[in-house]
Image (cartoon, coloured by chain):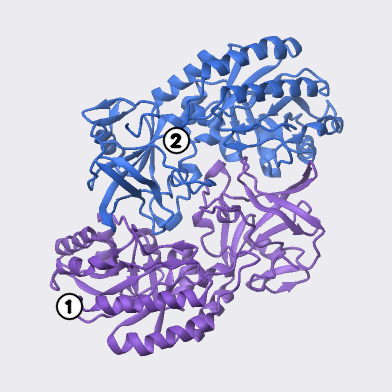
Chain colours: A purple, B blue
Amino acid sequence: MRTTDHVATFATDRGQLVIGGVPLDRLCERVGSTPFFAYDRAAITARVAAVRAALPDEIGLGYAVKANPMPAVVQHVAALVDHLDVASAGELAVALDAGQHPAHVSFAGPGKTDAELRRAVAADVTVEVESRTELQRLVRTGKEFGVRPRAAIRVNPAFAVHGSGMRMGGGPQQFGVDAELVASVLGEVTDHDIEVVGFHVFAGSQNLSAEILGQAQTKTVDLVLDLAQHVRGSVTYVNLGGGFGIPYFEKDQRLDLEAVGERLGRLVDERLKPALPEAAVVIELGRYLVGESGVYVTRVVDVKESRGRAYAVVDGGMHHQLAASGNFGQVIRRNYPIALGNRVEESPTGPVTVVGSLCTPLDVLGADVALPQVEVGDLVTIFQAGAYGLTASPTAFLGHPPPAEVLI
Amino acid sequence: MRTTDHVATFATDRGQLVIGGVPLDRLCERVGSTPFFAYDRAAITARVAAVRAALPDEIGLGYAVKANPMPAVVQHVAALVDHLDVASAGELAVALDAGQHPAHVSFAGPGKTDAELRRAVAADVTVEVESRTELQRLVRTGKEFGVRPRAAIRVNPAFAVHGSGMRMGGGPQQFGVDAELVASVLGEVTDHDIEVVGFHVFAGSQNLSAEILGQAQTKTVDLVLDLAQHVRGSVTYVNLGGGFGIPYFEKDQRLDLEAVGERLGRLVDERLKPALPEAAVVIELGRYLVGESGVYVTRVVDVKESRGRAYAVVDGGMHHQLAASGNFGQVIRRNYPIALGNRVEESPTGPVTVVGSLCTPLDVLGADVALPQVEVGDLVTIFQAGAYGLTASPTAFLGHPPPAEVLI
């Protein structure tokens, strides 16, 4: 079995992995240095199209910029989706620079500073409010400007979604307003002070089960319909979250997108739209739209054997792709899919442990990976690197140069 | 019990923590923004003095720049120690800019690129060679320049050190040359091509037991004496590593520095120096010299309660201090020592969960910490932040601004 069997298939050309139509050896020359992240423009376009095809037409598609905030990626995705979600003033600037209309930008995240709220109000984006006091601060900011801010309430539901990579709802949470407090929080502001357009409920991320996602969406719609009675005007915005996962590990089963779409279609047609006909319904995806489009490419600098174990030492490492090293909040270290991108058609000859250039034992990119005989100069390619790669990594650790990024 | 009882005592003034002689409220104004890292110059000086006092005079003290590569810190430490160890060309530049003589700089790390080797040879620092092939590449680089490079062999010992935070020796490793291969590796180069000055054996880091460190040092000296016979000239450099730990958690017992010094004194006087009289013996410390001198300071932006749990949301987070969030390779999340730096003398009123501003459930800086009643504007202070803080964190994650750094 090839180690790449469970990842989206990239084309190959004379043994080279092809990214964005360019064989890897040539892409290295074009980028000019290793290591680098490469994102395939057509793969992103195709993924968005697949999601569009599976989801009912009346559902808007949002992109969570935090998954990959490279400006070129955001620019590309912005033209394909209906909505951008940002998690900081920095991401807000990227979204606006990409030409996204502020009415279709939402700003979520606990701990927004006064400076961030001012920038959001000045930009006229929708602020997803995370607490009672944040709502008050937002109203105050609007009054200072003589602007009526636009807000949605981010809700911490009472239910939890199991089987998610990360749980972001249920029980006590730093995110959002507890569902049972929404009525009282909304009661403290007037329609004159602020326009409350609706709700955002996001219960978890990286889920591979259509069944569980469907159950969560059903509960989410029930919750939103219940909360909608406390909104004075029309509910014009309902963000159902996302949480669609991608396969990282050999036993991961790919999410059944069609099943997700069918359930969601029924839910929206039969329940949500009849009750809230003016609501723009948004599914917000980050990792699912861009994660599989990207690879991290790093060159083998040294090959060595130590007491019976073969090592390939590369010029990159955990400082660029922390999650692949298993050190980003993971309890168990498992290998991300890895191949030799310059010799993808060769059969594995034995296990090789791929380590980065950092002087720390944490810097393992792949333990005992089945690879062809590795040589100095080979291009180790780590898949599923299009989301939460570069920006989720400690690039300054040990003072090596940052990697390049390219969208092809 | 105060949560800070197990960390080095900073002075207080009118309820403010004092860093480098400056009360925290005033320091915030001086820095101009939160969050920030503050390092206490006098605390670093005092720690170096304590190590000097405990270690025998004939032992040189090295600083591992990777622990904290802030140029001002490196400049300060360089004037106090005998040796700097760097782990990349980036750190090499910082060390040389700090005025360190190249003869007292060593460059370790697997995966050194040809470009890095060229820079090291051009700078005339000691290259700590991590493999047979790296030694060959170093010789080749020297020939290209007409320069005889200076190298030490980094050795992967056959023994492991237990009780270390990270094990870097014993069994198969990406680091160094396996001890049993050193003779053959050295046999492949000539004294004309390269000057091999000695050895570096580093078996583990973050160890709090003088007993275990002593055993490791004894084994290390035995190993070095055995390997020394394969060096053609005199052995003039023996880097015994370091691995001295600092207390992070409530039950951590502080390392008995005097006991370490006594054992090491006997070992060097009775064993090492008689056999290798010309050797400069170096103990290389990073975290131990600077870790306790630093605090991470972040301001409370929001206070909320969710289903019975109190939260303080701060303007910083895991993107600045990843290790404190428990997501940097740690299996079990435990709180780093935390206080309200602007109200250090007040008694705790109850548990508060301190979360960062990132829109991810990973961003917890302290779970259920006993703190005084937290208010918006308070300054949450995380101790033991002088090493592996800023540079070991994914600063670009979610697009928030980077923190400031100050040495006072």
Q: Are marks 2 and 1 in contact (CB under 8 Å)?
A: no
Mark 2: secondary structure? loop
Give how far across and how far down residue A163 sits, in percent: 50, 67
Name the mark on residue B249: 2
Q: Quadrant of residue A299?
A: bottom right
Q: Which class describes the residues within 10 Å of circle 1: few (<14), some (14-19), or many (20+)?
A: some
Q: Is residue A272 left or right of residue B84?
A: left
Indicate the chain on which mark 2 is placed.
Answer: B
**B157 on left or right of A196:** right
Label 1: which secondary element:
loop
- Picture disc at residue B52: none
Q: Which residue is mark 1?
A: A232
Q: Is residue A345 left or right of residue B45?
A: right
Q: Quadrant of the N terminus of chain B?
A: top left
- Where is residue B333? Give x, y as percent: 47, 46
| Residue B321 x, y percent position in the rendering | 43, 44
The residue lying at 45 percent from left, 32 percent from top is B251
Q: Chain of mark 1?
A: A
Identified by mark 1, the residue type is Arg
